[in-house]
Amino acid sequence: MNKNYDPLIPDRDVAEFLQFMEGIFQCCRERMQDQSERFDLPDAELRCLLQFDGERYLTAKTLAYRLNVAKSRVTKLVSSLIRRGLLVSLPDPADSRVKLLSLTPKGGRLLRDISIFRFKMHRAVLEQFSAGQRVALLDSLSLLSRHMKSAKDMVE
């Protein structure tokens, strides 16, 4: 049992929270599917491409860790993105056994377009809230994020 278990939290509150979280997660999956269709990229390739935001180079090992998939799956994703002209594989000057993956100019443009679209989409959501509601929402989401990260260590 969780040492921080609070018996004063009604089960219905936990069930409602679970339902909200599942609904939000489903909405996010649907948004990713919409983005995949809009940018003509399978979901996994889109998620892989998004990992390069703000990165000059990544390795297959890093991508596998970030995407939580096997390195063999990353190899297939990367191969497809290379065939599409979105990524390039370069030898690591420090270790010739390692391949560095980088966006091509075409991949950079596509990632920028995706990022702009995602920014506009999130702006459209926030525009539905008043300024005070936005502050409260962002504070609550920050708090939720922190507690979700720490909860995995507390549940036995």
Image: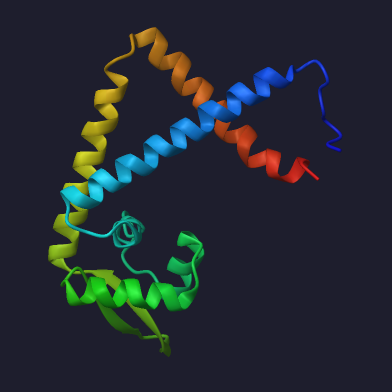
| The residue positioned farthest toward the bottom in the image shown | 96
Residue 42, compared with residue 59, is above or below; it is: above
The residue under the point 36% across, 86% down is 93
Q: Position of residue 135 (x, y in %)?
A: 43, 15
Image quarter of residue 86: bottom left
**Could you say which is closer to the camera, residue 40 or residue 87?**
40
Q: Is residue 11 left or right of residue 40?
A: right
Residue 2, compared with residue 66, is above or below; it is: above
Residue 136, compared with residue 143, is above or below; it is: above
Q: Position of residue 14 (x, y in %)?
A: 67, 24
**Could you say which is closer to the camera, residue 54 or residue 64?**
64
Image quarter of residue 34: top left
The colour style of the image is: rainbow
**What count of labels does the image hold?**
0
Q: Quadrant of the N terminus?
A: top right
Residue 40, compared with residue 95, is above or below; it is: above
Q: Position of residue 60 (x, y in %)?
A: 42, 74
The residue under the point 24% across, 46% down is 35
Q: Position of residue 99 (x, y in %)?
A: 37, 82
Q: Quadrant of the C terminus?
A: top right
The residue under the point 16% across, 48% down is 38
